[in-house]
Amino acid sequence: MEPVMITLGQALQKTATKFPLRPALTHTAQGVKLSYSELLGESEKAARGLMALGIVKGDRVAVFAPNIPEWIVSMAAVLGMGAVLVPVDPGADKDLLLHILGRVEAPRKGHCRWGALPDGPDEKARGRA
């Protein structure tokens, strides 16, 4: 058996096409459920928001968040647009956080809170629908 060589972004697109209504993400604490089609749509919106901020393929994007639906959507957005995901432990202390961000070597530095991206994800992914 040969390994399948596709990116995670491509895998999400294929799965959303083949099984659009199947559950992709369930966060019981927030009561959020997204199908593969919804996850793909939300990640595409987030990717457009990142691109509007100047993020391009190959850029490193640090995601500093706990285990919430937005983390999964962010991961899919970053990887789907060909950028490099840098997951950062939300429990990291200030020194570790500064060390990680210093090593990221991003071409631009800044931050954006969830929902503040231009054309960013909608209320459903934030668990407020």
Image (cartoon, rainbow, N blue to C red):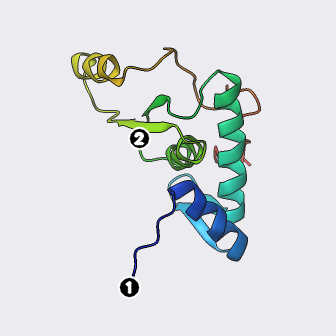
Please name whichever residue, 72 or 84, is drawn nearer the observer in this view of the structure: 84
Could you tell me residue 65's position as x and y percent? 44, 36
Establish if 118 lies above or below 10.
Answer: above
Residue type, numbered disc 1? Met
Local SS, label 1: loop
Q: From the viewer's perspective, is 15 left or right of 107?
A: right
Query: Residue 25 occupies which quadrant of the picture?
Result: bottom right
Marks 1 and 2, how far apart at CA? 37 Å
Query: Residue 121, can we see it?
Result: no
Closer to viewer: mark 1 or mark 2:
1
**Crowdedness of circle 2 by 10 Å Cα count: few (<14), some, many (20+)?**
few
Establish if 56 lies above or below 12.
Answer: above
Q: Which residue is mark 1?
A: 1
Please name whichever residue, 55 or 67, is drawn nearer the observer in this view of the structure: 55
Q: Which residue is mark 2?
A: 66
Q: Identify the residue at image location x=68%, y=67%.
A: 16
